[in-house]
Image: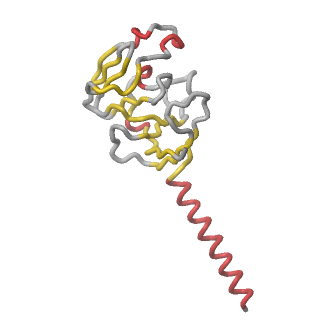
Amino acid sequence: MAADRRFISGAALVVLGAAGFLILARNYSIGLDLQDTTCLDDRVYIIRHGCGEIYRGGAYAFRAEGLEPLIRDGSTLVKTVSGVPGDIVTITAERTEVNGVRVSGGPAMAEKFGHKGSYFTRSLTVPYGKYFLTGTNDRSLDSRYTGTVREDLCVGRAFPLF
């Protein structure tokens, strides 16, 4: 009788644990930045699926689209949302500003694409439904090179672990 109760209790704990894991797995994932030079300050992120309202300054995960051969379509990228719809972005060879505030350096990787930094120099207004993404590292492949990113490519909010 006592053995039956322990078995039932143990089985219930296993079922509850499995259910909890499935709920977490559906709503969260782990993001890893395994590059030699990271794009942001951390290497491991918890990604809470679903973007809700996207805020300037927050770290978000986005699906890559149209960046091949540099990044495979569908890959998850974690970047900082530096510009939201209506913001004015100015990119010079030395710096990137949003609404007059420096958010990053200039396009340091321009030569990787066969251009001088001045090739990427421009000013733009972030359109409705799009975002301007940056990394904290000046060598991050981000909106300085690829342009704004559509909101529907947002996977979720990213929270740094370490």
- Measuring from the top left, give residue 80's x and y in whole percent: 42, 35
Q: Quadrant of residue 33?
A: top right
Q: Quadrant of residue 106?
A: top left
Q: Is residue 88 above or below residue 19?
A: above
Question: At 45% across and 7% down in the image, what residue appears?
Answer: 116
Question: At 31% across and 20% down in the image, what residue appears?
Answer: 90
Q: From the viewer's side, name the closer residue of 104 and 145.
A: 104
Which of the image's four quarters has the C terminus?
A: top right
Q: From the viewer's side, name the closer residue of 82 and 26.
A: 82
- Measuring from the top left, give residue 11's x and y in whole percent: 67, 75
Q: From the viewer's side, name the closer residue of 93 and 19.
A: 93
State the scheme by which the image is colored: secondary structure
- Measuring from the top left, give residue 95's x and y in whole percent: 37, 19
- Measuring from the top left, give residue 100's x and y in whole percent: 26, 24
Question: At 72% across and 86% down in the image, what residue appears?
Answer: 4
Q: Quadrant of residue 125?
A: top left
Which of the image's four quarters has the N terminus?
A: bottom right
Tally of numbered discs: 0
